[in-house]
Amino acid sequence: MTSSSATRLLQAVLGCLLVVAPADVAAQTTEDLFNTATLQRVDLEVHSSDWAKLQENFQTNTYYPADFVWNGQTVRNVGIRSRGRGSRNAHKPGLKIDFDRYSTNQKFLGLKSLVLDNLTQDPSGIHETVSMRFYQRLGIPTPRETHVRLYVRGEYIGLYALVESIDKDFLKRIYGSIGDDTQNDGWLYEFVWQEDWRFTDLGTDLAAIKLHFDATTHESKPDEDKYRPIQELITLANQTSEDRFVEVIGPRFDLPGFIRFVAAQAFLGDTDGFLGAFGINNFYLYRLENKIQHVLIAWDTDNTFWGPTFPVKPDDTNVLMQKLMRIPEYNALWFAELARASQMAEAENWLDTEIIRSVQLIDSAMKEDVYKPYSNNSYEGEAGFMLSFARDRIAYVKCALAQGDRACGG
């Protein structure tokens, strides 16, 4: 789609702009906080010198005290810090909000922390929120997200995505309880990109594992307890032949869940996910409580929606995918999950409707955001592209599943 046609499409859609009501002042639940139908407002009251220091030292994780205000409710003396990797920005910093940083056990609506994603790597402003809602629709563990206007000391800083933290509160919500046992005390790791790594064997030295997997629970436990199960999973995945792969790896890694996860990423054209162009990236790994099996949790999907002709043939340079695609059961499951993603996107016109709704919701806030690192013309072009994505992607995937990527122009 050309820039001019994308802009015309955006203008046509915004001509039917929805009127969004403000949130109910009496709202008291996380469902209200993450209400996707409302563009909400979050205020941070922070000393001017502290805000200046945070912006100046945006590459560090130094905390500063602030008050967090949402929907008439104030949480005092929270900790805020700059966050992100490639998205770090001095003028529009991504932020981590820790409610218990200075007040032990303090929570907000039952949450210990929140993330404010600055959307600096996504001129459309909706990659992250739309993709996460789609993954939820497919049954993939994902954080809740919504858009907010962020004000600091009364000044509009810009449009942000408010993101649920991946922590024990999240694990409790996703994995629930078995009897009286809350399933949130397993071993959680944030993947940290280091280099173009594609699940090749890292050896038995745990130092390499620690570089790639940052433990965010049980941090004080010995490295042998934290990292040896991951090292063994990786080594076994490399050393086990296809005829025994499911038998050996299945108990240690949720293979059907993995295929569902990467097929969903492929459907949405994610260039920086588990099968990313520059190696594995952007997920949490969770070892279930009292089990040896690991599962994946979606995280940081700014680089989805590469384009309608993103190939349906999986990357065969990743060790896990290479071996699974040689197993007929999992080769078939890959294409079945792609087909299911396409069907779920098309059912009731869900993906197209969600993209239209999201663009309408954020349009004014995005255009008024003077701190975003791209122009309004760039935003309009990317938003216009998004408005055509669902129809074009569904058509391409249907064709490619029937005839192959090459036959469909991919």
Image (cartoon, rainbow, N blue to C red):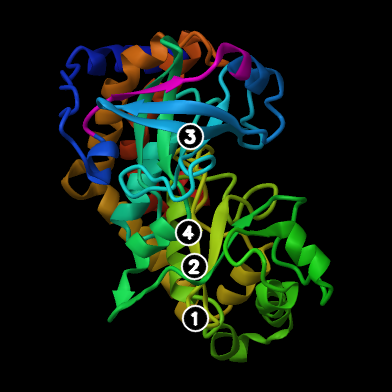
Q: Is residue 365 left or right of residue 306?
A: left
Number of marks in picture: 4
Q: Is residue 399 left or right of residue 405?
A: left
Q: Nearer the viewer, mark 1 or mark 2?
A: 2
Q: Secondary structure at mark 4?
A: strand
- The residue that appears at 24% across and 29% down in the rendered structure is 357
User: Which of the 4 quarters of the picture holds residue 56?
Assistant: top right
Residue type, mark 4 in image: Ile
Q: 277 or 289, which lies in front? A: 289
- The residue that appears at 30% across and 29% down in the rendered structure is 358
Question: Which numbered disc flags the more N-terminal residue, 3 or 4?
Answer: 3
Q: Residues within 10 Å of mark 4 (few under 14, many from 20)?
A: many
Q: Secondary structure at mark 1?
A: helix
**Mark number displayed over residue 160:** none
- The residue that appears at 37% across and 52% down in the rendered structure is 135
- The residue that appears at 62% across and 13% down in the rendered structure is 49
Residue labelled with disc 1:
328
46 is within the stretch colored magenta: yes
Q: Which residues are magenta?
A: 37-50
Q: Position of residue 175 (x, y in %)?
A: 36, 68
Alpha-carbon distance for marks 4 and 2? 10 Å
Question: Which numbered disc flags the more N-terminal residue, 1 or 2?
Answer: 2
Residue labelled with disc 4:
297
Alpha-carbon distance for marks 1 and 4? 26 Å
Residue labelled with disc 3:
78
Residue 241, compared with residue 104, is above or below; it is below
Q: Nearer the viewer, mark 4 or mark 2?
A: 4
Residue type, mark 3 in image: Val
Question: Which numbered disc flags the more N-terminal residue, 3 or 2?
Answer: 3
